[in-house]
Amino acid sequence: MSEKTTGRKQAAIQWLKDNNTYLILLVMIIVSAVISNNFLTAKNLGNLVKQNSIKGMLAMGMLLIIMTGDIDLSVGSLTGASNVLAAVALTDWSMGAGTAIFLAIGVSAAMGIVNGFFIVYRKLPAFIVTLAMMTIARGFAYLWSGGRPISVSDPVLTGIKQSEFLGLPPYVWFFVIIFAIMFVALRYVPYGRIIKAIGSNEQAVRLAGIRVNRYRFSIYVITGLLCGLAGVCSVGRIGSASPLLGEGYEMDAISMVVIGGASLSGGKGDTLKTLAGIFIIGMIGNIMNLMNVSAYWQHVIQGVIILAAIILQVQTGKKKDR
C-alpha cells in the first residue's frame, strides 16, 4: 500500500473519530424515523426540542466543569431546589414574580459559589463536595415545599410556556441564547480557551501568570445560575413545582457532555458536539416513548451509551499517544 493511500486511510479514520458524535446522531435520526412514523412529525420534533432545552442548560454548565477535569453531581438538586423556591416564594411567601425568580436563581448561584469555594479554594474533591451539595439542596427542596407539589398560576411564569415566538416558548429561546454565548466563548473568547487549557495542563496555565482559581471558581457560579434558570423555567413549563424535580438530571447532563466527546480527564469539549449529545440522549427517551417501551430501559441504554463513549475516548487517546 502506497504512502498516499495510507495517508488517506488514516485521514478518513481520524475524520470518523472527530465526527463520531454527529454520525451517531444521524444514524439515530434515520433509525428512529424507520421505527416510528411519528418521529419526524412537526409535533414530535417540537416536543423533542422543548423537552431537552431545560436539561440542555445544565449540560452547558456541565461542559465547562468537565472541561476543567472536574464533575458536578449537584446540578439536578440545584434545579429542584430553585424550582421549589420560586413556587414557594410566589404562593406561600406572597412575593412578586420578579422577586421570586431573582431569589430562586440567586440561591442556586449561591449554592454554586459554595461548591466553587470548597473545591477551588479549600482543595476538596469535586465529587465529594457536589455530592454533599446534592443532598443539601434536595433537603432544602423538601423543607421549603413540605414534600408536596405546588401549583403555580402566576401569569409571568406560566407565560414561559404559553407565549411563543416562531412557534417556540421562551425557555427554548433561553437555551438558544445560552448555547450561542457558550459557542462564542469557547471558540472565540480568551475565557473559553483558558478553561480548556486549565483542563489540559493547569500547572502550565498557572505558570503563565493566569489566575487559575478565578476561572475555575467562575464555572461553578455560572453552573449555579444555569441551574436556577432551569428550575424557574421548569415551574412555568409544568405549571407546578415538586421537590422530586431534577432527580437524575445530573446523569443526563453528564451523559450529554460525554456523548458530545468531552473528556472526563479535562481539556476537551465542544458546544456543537454537546448539542448533538443533548439530542442523542433526548432521542433515546423520545423514541422509546413513541414505542411504549418502559422508562426503566431508557436508563439501561443510556448507561450503556455512556460506557461505550468512555471506552471510545480511552481507545482514541491511547492510539494518539503511540
Image (spheres, helix red, strand yellow):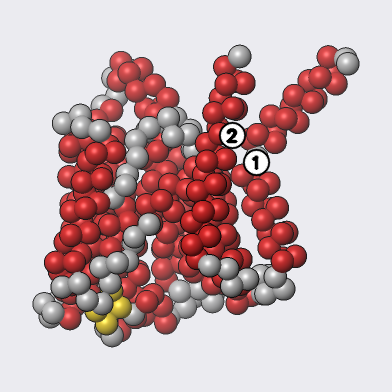
Say which quadrant the C terminus sits in. top right
Give the percent coordinates (x, y) of residue 152. Answer: 27, 82
Examine the rendered structure and indicate whether residue 79 appears above or below residue 275.
below
Q: Rate crowding at label 2 as few (under 14), some (14 to 19) or many (20 or more) other CA atoms within 10 Å.
A: some
Place residue 115 in its image quadrant.
top left
Q: Residue visible at 32% across and 66% down?
A: 245
Left or right, 111 with respect to 68, comes to left
Nearer the observer: mark 1 or 2; the answer is 2
Left or right, 229 with respect to 163, comes to left
Left or right, 257 with respect to 5, comes to left
Give the percent coordinates (x, y) of residue 179. Answer: 46, 53
Give the percent coordinates (x, y) of residue 313. Answer: 55, 32
Left or right, 23 with respect to 308, comes to right
Secondary structure of residue under mark 1 = helix
Q: Residue visible at 54% across and 72% down?
A: 47
Place residue 212 in its image quadrant.
top left
Say which quadrant the N terminus sits in. top right
Examine the rendered structure and indicate whether residue 72 appears above or below residue 296.
above
Q: Residue visible at 17% across and 45% down?
A: 114
Three-letter amino acid code of the residue under disc 1: Asn
The residue singled out by tag 1 in the image is 20
Q: Residue visible at 30% across and 20% down?
A: 206
Kindly report the distance in space between the C-alpha atoms of the residues bearing marks 1 and 2.
Answer: 10 Å
The residue singled out by tag 2 in the image is 312
Secondary structure of residue under mark 2 = helix
Three-letter amino acid code of the residue under disc 2: Leu
Circles 1 and 2 in contact, beta carbons < 8 Å:
yes
